[in-house]
Image (cartoon, grey):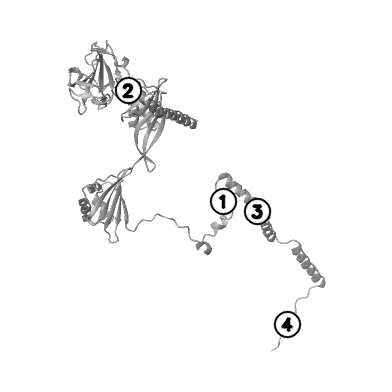
Amino acid sequence: MTTEPSKAPPLYPKTHLLAASGIAALLSLALLVFPSSDVEAKKTTLSLELESPAEQLTQDQDAADVVQATNEPAASPFAQIENSAEDTPETAQVAPAPVVEEKKAPGHREVIVSKGDTLSTLFEKVGLPATSVHEVLASDKQAKQFSQLKHGQKLEFELSPDGQLTNLHSKVSDMESISLTKNDKGYAFNRITAKPTVRSAYVHGVINSSLSQSAARAGLSHSLTMDMASVFGYDVDFAQDIRQGDEFDVIYEQKVVNGKAIGNGPILSARFTNRGKTYTAVRYTNKQGNSSYYTADGNSMRKAFIRTPVDFARISSKFSMGRKHPILNKIRAHKGVDYAAPRGTPIKAAGDGKVLLAGRRGGYGNTVIIQHGNTYRTLYGHMQGFAKGIKTGGSVKQGQVIGYIGTTGLSTGPHLHYEFQVNGVHVDPLGQKVAMADPISKAERSRFLAQSQPLMARMDQEKTTQLASKR
């Protein structure tokens, strides 16, 4: 077998080889002098991240200034790193801060009374048998108060390790709670009554609608509004004298338990401005223990008669000798004043006196007639009914409720027909001037002023402060 000789690589001219070597050398030199764009970009980014210590300090100080100015924490400079590292093993090892919860005893149970709940169903909710209910209620006569449940009331159970009831507790009001505690004889009932702290409170109001609405808006309760009307009822007719822009200031006792107002006491002092005239009242208890209201200078607020026997009523017909009767349709003297008010509104005696009549009287319907001393007599007609204890021959005190607004007799709607006689002659109750009661005695005047002057000064100060805060 003949072996073929190997082929030699092609031969290039010498001039070509020299040219190729020169090109390669030029390319190598270019790479050394002009690096790639990728490398250059990486260097530029690195140079931006590396800041001088002075620049870093300036940024930290700016962040601190922002925190101080806004009182809010500045965003962490490592926020992006922290967020992006949530799934790293290092982050996973960091446990969240524990939530601190109020620990209850192992045997403590609480239930809230819902609609349809009974003591038996509540016992079942905490795992107690029905026999426990009978045992609890039979343990003490007062224990039955636990069966008088209210919607939203909370019952707290304390159970022994073996599941037996050891204590049952419930708060029945802001001031009162009841409990049953197990002992050797069964369960002992206990009532805890909190003693309220008494403090004074102040309200100021301007009437721009009705008195009741304006008083409620100012923060005065309905009962205190009625009390205020009663205090000033001798001077101000709340049925027809009230005008928009009238003002009132009241300082009253407030009962507080655990910082929460749970009730009110009497009005201590008050001021009422009606049609530009200001009336003042201060409550004063004399050395004998009798309380009454007086003006700031010691005159009694109590007159011989109150101005109107119905609170917040509307005058539907005034005193007139030539009024056309709405039912008889003929001219007939109207010898009194009609006060229109909702059916059932209380009617008060205008003054102390003896009841001459509490019964039916012709067109007046159910009527009360009161004799006040030898000179005055008042009549109250069209009543729905009489108050408890009001009867012919009895006695009444000023302001005592004697009956309720109705439509008995010749009446087109619920109202009170009120008449006032002086020595047997009908006079207009709205125009009748009445005498004042006795003022503060000289023996107690200094004691009275020591109480009244600070109250008047406080009302002035409170009003000024409140008005200034609204500007």
Which residue is identified by label 3?
56
Counting from the top left corner in percent of width and height, residue 297 is at: 40, 23
Instruction: Indicate the secondary structure of the residue bearing disc 3.
Output: helix
Q: Determine whether, in the image, residue 308 is placed left or right of residue 94.
A: left
Which residue is identified by label 4?
6
Counting from the top left corner in percent of width and height, residue 205 is at: 41, 28
Split into 4 quadrants, where in the image is the N terminus?
A: bottom right
Toward the right, the furthest residue is 15
Q: Amino acid at mark 3?
A: Gln
Instruction: Indicate the secondary structure of the residue bearing disc 1.
Output: loop
Visible in this render: residue 210?
no
Q: Residues within 10 Å of mark 4 (few under 14, many from 20)?
A: few
Q: Amino acid at mark 4?
A: Ser
Examine the image and state in which quarter residue 218 appears. top left
Which residue is identified by label 1?
75
Q: Earlier in the sequence, mark 4 or mark 2?
A: 4
Residue at 35% x, 35% y: name it: 264
Counting from the top left corner in percent of width and height, residue 240 is at: 34, 20
Q: Residues within 10 Å of mark 3 (few under 14, many from 20)?
A: few
Q: Earlier in the sequence, mark 1 or mark 2?
A: 1
Label placed on residue 302: 2
Q: Mark 4 to mark 1: distance in Å?
A: 78 Å
Of 91 and 445, the residue lying toward us: 445
Q: Mark 3 to mark 1: distance in Å?
A: 16 Å
Q: Mark 1 to mark 2: distance in Å?
A: 70 Å
| In front: label 4 or label 1 | 1
Counting from the top left corner in percent of width and height, residue 232 is at: 35, 24
